[in-house]
Amino acid sequence: MTPAHSLYEALYVSTLAPDQPLSVVAEIAGHARAKNARLGITGLLVFDGMRFCQQLEGTQKEVLKLTERIRNDPRHTGVEVLHHGLLSERRFHQFSLAFTSVDDAEALARLERMDGEAALAAFEALRSELEL
């Protein structure tokens, strides 16, 4: 496989824009499920009432394009990619986008202060605590 077609992942955090109603979160998740399925992207989106944290996986080309679209989406502010890189196998092959919320308001705030492998490990630990 060429690098653009290699399996790739990105983990980012962002904040819901202050002018956006909470109802937009369901809209984002619903739209993303359909689009991700068409693009061969899988992942998990976690929301804490204010922050998003999402792990995306797919071809490098599609994951990078999607990350850039999210960065330019006015419903998100402060988009920060915490980790990205090649991935040996999908973690979320059973769904195009899993969506869940987290009750611990500080979980994503703590994760937001990390990067690289530490951020990925913290997200994996959080994921293991969630009901998916």
Image (cartoon, helix red, strand yellow):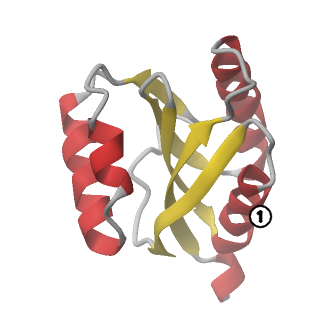
Q: Residue at x 68, y 34 (%)?
A: 17
Q: Is residue 35 above or below residue 3?
A: above
Which of 89 and 60 lies nearest the eye of the viewer? 60
The location of residue 103, given as percent across then percent down, is 29, 19
Place of residue 35 in the rendered image (x, y in percent of width and height, measured from the top left): 78, 38
Type of residue at label 1? Lys
Which quarter shows the N terminus? bottom right
Q: In the rendering, at what x and y percent does residue 27 appear?
A: 73, 19
Q: Residue furthest front?
A: 18
- Is residue 31 positioned above or below 116 on the image? above
Q: Which residue lies under the disc numbered 1?
A: 65
Q: Is residue 48 left or right of residue 77?
A: left
Secondary structure under badge 1? helix
Q: Residue at x 79, y 45 (%)?
A: 73
Q: Where 85 falls versus 23 (above or below)? A: below
Picture quadrant of residue 102: top left
Residue 120 in the image: state x and y as whole percent: 31, 61
Depth order, front residue of 106/90: 106
Q: Outermost residue, bottom direction? A: 2
The residue depicted at 42 percent of the width and 26 percent of the height is: 48
